[in-house]
Amino acid sequence: EKDGFDWFMLKEIAEQPKAVADTLLGRLSDTGALVLDELRLTEQELRDIDKVFVVACGTAYHAGLIAKYAIEHWTRIPVEVELASEFRYRDPVLDRSTLVVVVSQSGETMDTLMALRHAREQKAKVLAICNANGSTIPRESDAVLYTHAGPEVAVASTKGFLTQVVACYLVGAFLAQVRGVKYADEVAAIVDELRALPEKVTEVLATMEPVRELARSLATEDTLLFLGRHVGYPVALEGALKLKELAYIHAEGFAAGELKHGSIALIDQGTPVVVIVPSPLSRESVHGKVVSNIQEVRARGARTIVIAEEGDEDVVPFADHLIRVPRTPTLLAPVVTTVPLQVLACEIAATRGLDVDQPRNLAKSVTVE
Ligand code: F6R
């Protein structure tokens, strides 16, 4: 039941703090260590992993793109992210020391299932990150880490996505812990930061009224662009996908630094551009570059919608609309920055009079290749 919400999607967006908390439950010990017995790999097997593939479709693929940043940084193991529908046709290099992480909310996506079968035939170890208990993908995998998001009814994935991202962090931090890496202190600190995430998502949800208002003013647009860098780039892709599937508005996500290599020609007077700004404190500091990107698009007429951390004053002069999110370590920021984009897409679709829970041409699980 919708519990008083107009749409299942709104209900599921609101459930995200609990979904994230449930996904962390029992997996973080009081001593700061991670407990992931579900991985079912011996310590030796975990140490022998020399390459990781994350394979998924759609929104789950975006979770994989975020996973790449976190897993490579924490573990120094090379990570490739691949669309499940492309994976096996490319004849990827796989062997016993390859870990293939398949990510699927439904556990029934045929493209992802075929990719996992291919990986297992090639002797790779397959870990499923999945939400649906006992579904086909976890049954056929070597191991499974369940996201405890609860049932997702709306076709567009929201809490499914956020918990997939969190599960990917758990895998990355656990691999780092077992293998003992140079960023050990940072990984220990991350455990505390993971614990703080549900509260931060609650904070974001409490400030969504201006986003709903903004959405109503965007409902007649015919194109929206989304820009991000580092982990903000997959968030931009996710924001664009949500808008396309729900509101049937043309939307594209770009790596902000890539814009000047062609796509900036799309910007015209009044083109709405959503920019996901990394923390000014990020060690990877691309913050200044993203602030410049906002200036560049604005100088060409864009109407800028800026998502930035509380306390980031650098963006203020260039933001036509400013959406604040709580301070969060760079790699974990997608858990907070995605939420306003979900609300934006949902509200734009509702304003256009569309069926938010059942967009045209889409099914909740895609069981054909
Ligand atoms: C978008 C969406 C789809 C799914 C994709 C994979 O909101 O829901 O892009 O993410 O079809 O589905 P699962 O995760 O069930 O494999």
Image (cartoon, grey):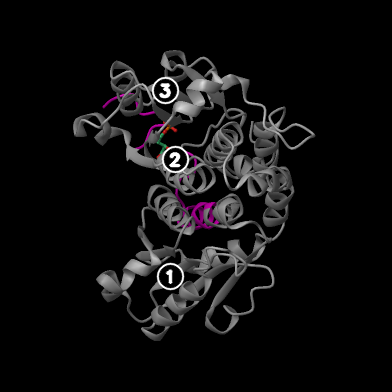
Pick the quarter of the image with the N terminus: top right
In the image, is 235 to the left or to the right of 16? left
Tell me where the magenta segment starts and ends, as one range: 342-369
- Does the beta carbon of the residue at mark 1 sit less than 8 Å from ligand 1? no
In the image, is 293 to the left or to the right of 91? right
Q: Nearer the viewer, residue 327 or 42?
A: 42
In the image, is 82 to the left or to the right of 279? left
Numbered disc total? 3
Report crowding for label 2: few under 14, some 14 to 19, many 20 or more residues within 10 A (C-alpha). Answer: some
Q: Which residue is mark 3?
A: 126
**Residue 365 lies within the magenta run:** yes
Residue at (51, 75) in percent of width and height: 288
| Amino acid type of the residue tagged 2 in the rendering | Ile
Where's residue 285, x and y in %? 53, 68
- Mark whose residue sits in front, 2 or 3: 2
Q: Which residue is mark 1?
A: 273
Where's residue 206, x and y in %? 72, 56
Above or below residue 118? Residue 234 is: below
